[in-house]
Amino acid sequence: MKKKAVILAAGEGRRLRPFTETMPKVMLPVANKPLLEYVFDAVRKSGIEEIIVVVGYKKEVIMEYFKDYKNVKITYVNQDRQLGTAHALLQAKKHIKDSFIVLAGDNIIDPDSIAKLLKDKSEYSLLIKEHPHPSKYGVVFVENRSIRRIVEKPKEDIGKYISTGIYKLPRSVFTDIEQCTSEGAHALSSIVQYLVDKRKPINTIFAKSWMDIVYPWDLISVNEAMIQETSASTSGIIEKGVILKGMVSVGKDTKIYSGCYIVGPVVIGNSCEIGPNTCIFPSTSIGNHTVIHPFSEIRSSVIMNDVHIASNSHISRSVIGKGCIIGNNFSTMTGKTMIEIDDEFKRLETPIGAMVGEDCVIESHVVVDPGKIIGRKCKISPMKHIRKNIPSESKVM
Amino acid sequence: MCGIIGYAGFRDARTVLLESLKRLDYRGYDSAGIAIIDNKLKVYKEVGEIANVEKKIPLLKGTIGVGHTRWATHGGVTKENAHPHVSCDKTIAIVHNGIIENYSKLKEELIKKGHKFTSQTDSEVIVHLIDDAYKGNLEDAVAAAVKKIQGSYSIVAVSEKEPEKIVGIRKESPLVIGVGDSENFFASDITAFLKYTNRVIFLNDGELCVITKNSINIVDKNRKPIKKKEEHITWDVKDAEKSGFAHFMLKEIYEQPDTINQALRGRISEIEETIVFPERVEKLLNNEISTIHIVACGTSYYAGLVSKYLIEQLTNIPVFVEFASEYRYFGVRNESSLIIAITQSGETADTLAALREAQMSGCKTLVVTNVIGSTATRISDGYILQQSGPEIGVAATKTFTSQIIVLFLIALKLALHQKTLGPNELYNYILHLRELPRNVRDILERSDDIIAIAKHLKDAKSVFFIGRGINYPLSLEGALKLKEISYIHAEGFAAGELKHGPFALLTKNTPVVAIVTQDETYEKILSNIGEIKARGSTVIAIAEEKDTEIEKHADFVLRFLASSHVLPCISITVVLQLLAYHVALLRKCPIDKPRNLAKSVTVE
């Protein structure tokens, strides 16, 4: 019997717009690897032999990137309409013959926790995690290690354990799902509540490390955490007079010009051009084919693929989307800021800079206030000071 | 035009051969077969897809064997004509790719000697010739047999009397050796064994090789042992798989933002404002060049036509684009002209012949190809790799756009040498090249618009594609894509030529796809569209994002981003590819394997 995992990767991740306008959430890069690749890696290391990936929203982006994956068989199944996680899982039914695990493609999890789940003797089990702000998640109430109740995204912070959405389930669960979805319940958590109501014991196991990305700025903190795990390796051309300190990884065909000062952990992708005299400071990821011109400073940021940053720019605690063209003297301001989310204002605990969507063209000398989100494909004229969020495809004249 | 494979190792040969043949079936897919030595020589062949053959083959224990997938050239598509072919006593089996020109004479002689033929193929004479020469050593017999053969061939042979070895030899047809641990391979193409090894040895014409599980021995024409270098291929087997995409063609279309970057990889520097090629290529481009002849076939020929416009625009060097099959016989050869051959596989027979002809008359030759170590890279004075990874779909997509990019880089380099391009202009071109991947992503994100338009073409009997300037060869390519995968008759025309003839064919049931860019011919193409509309035909325009005038003229508009006047041809090509794909999909055509076509045409 082959150990199988179903990974749910069909969702859009609306709260992560503008970055998810052209790719599904699972493809957001962290330390130059999509979230989904971390999940694949963890699943593979835990001993899973076959992966079924449920894809839907912008599925081509996933399929084009992964193609086939290191010695683990991958089967793609399609969810045409993104109705919910249970409905997504149902699409994998015909590929499942025995008990299996299911997990979300956009949560980073460690392989040991999955291995623990696999070894668990009970028919149904769930990985849970203690969380300071459980209200964003499915809150789990536990009695004798079994689930008593699960409440999806409660209005206020109640309880202290949340569901990671990583389950081990028997094949028979598909019958339950079919029952529930026919009654209009499409979320996996409602299936769990249904099972609890039917007095099925659902065992809980603590996950060691588990991370979720909910808002665009979460990319900065998750990138900071995951970049620690990468190892130093340098290829490409590094000119004389470049200083590399700590863990710095430089990809193939990348050229770093003289006078650059790079302090790890820093990951730089393939075919980039950096410098001369550019400074890159810890917890920065720079994607493939990106060019950074002289005298720029980048710190704690995620710069995606195909980005062009002209000279004298200062980018800190920011996310720059794929394909952006940024003129010289671009500057992001950082600070603890009030952010409007889902109609309520929240003060962020850590300072953040700018969130710039894909394919923006920003002319020279543009300054962005802390925490401002610039949508995808925006055009910004020279000398502009961006003080509020800019919707996608707008022009700032 | 066929795919061949040979395996000697420790794995179950049946599985390895079938797996490899599936990866070769783009080279031919009308019949297939395998021969395995399982104590005795056992041969299985069938008409149709490899899956048909697979069903008929029992589990066998053998770990050595040969396989073949056929695209008929001599003799119809029948089980008898499928390879492997066996000797009269059924102890020797061969697979062959190529054409034996003197086979009828050889066949007569062999029949006189008592050999019994069971097929109508030219290939069968080979196995009887080997059988005739066999005196206990297979490589001696193969060497003796090929001495009598005229034509092109790659041959792989096994004999149950020497159950450890496989013998391979080539002349003007591709054959590569895959080097594994305790296993070795022969194949027409690297992709066949990429799943098992990425270490490759390329054979030259006339070289003969014997592989066993643990050894590879190569001899030259005079049977003198030679040592050859192993090369490591960076392609990955995952590149040759479809993953979740419905077709290879669609996957390859979606790969283009990446393959464009790959074509530029290591060649342009934005910070240094330079374009760099290998030294041999630099030297070729630095020469006094009076004219350029581009020789190619099929889609590569259209890439050549596109580059004619790019090179002439940038350099003032006249460019002549010629079909390789014509140039080799009729082309004008001038020592001061540079011959640029474009061949994706590096094995296209006509293009190779044209290259050889050109070299004989003293011309310098430069090859643009996708396959390192291919014949074209070895016989030319210099080569540039497209770096696009293997292309499996028979309809060329990503390799076409990569070829254009590489040729554009050549054009820029030539312009620098000719001093027709200043450094500041070069910098702008480099920036525009960097923007291409995002322009292509933009098209891919709008594929829903293209799907909607495809409905208007799916029932057409005939479709016209028109354009002016560089858009003319794109019209040809658009028409080629449509006809080869959707089987709708399609023609590309220079828009100005419509009224000199083709107009007679235009009816209101002939949709016209017009490529419109805002250059000096903009007004002209609008009036062409007007003339077409006057005859009641539907016009689908492919136009720039910012062009608001076009809606008033065309029935439907498909948009592309043109951040500059440079290279919108890449974005337009992607629109044309997706259009052809979706029309074919609606018509339920076998997109990756259109009837009667094969990927790389290694016969003349």
Image: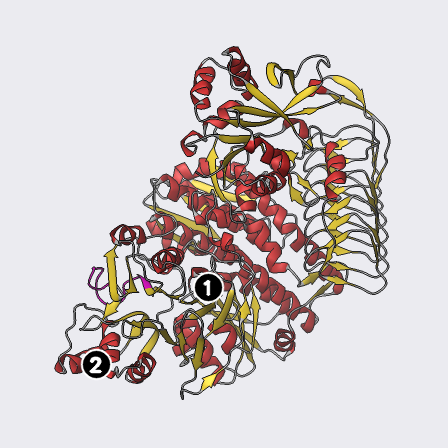
Residue B244 on the magenta span: no
Reading the image, the residue beneath label 2 is: B106
Q: Residue at x 75, y 38 (%)?
A: A225
Count the labels in the image. 2
Which SS type dominates the magenta stretch?
Answer: loop
Q: Amino acid at mark 2?
A: Leu
* 3D distance between C-alphas at marks 1 and 2: 32 Å
Task: Identify the residue position indicated by label 1 in the image.
Answer: B190
What coloring was used for the rendering?
A: secondary structure
Mark 2 burial class by Cα count in 10 Å: few <14, some 14-19, many 20+: some
Cβ–Cβ under 8 Å for marks 1 and 2:
no
Q: Quadrant of the N terminus of chain A?
A: top left
What type is the residue that disc 1 sits on?
Ile
SS category of the residue bearing label 2 = helix
Q: Earlier in the sequence, mark 1 or mark 2?
A: 2
Q: Which residues are magenta?
A: B67-82
Q: Position of residue A355 (x, y in %)?
A: 75, 35
Q: Residues within 10 Å of mark 1 (few under 14, many from 20)?
A: many
Task: Please tell me whether residue B80 belongs to the stretch shown in magenta.
Answer: yes
In this rendering, position of residue B100 left or right of residue A249: left
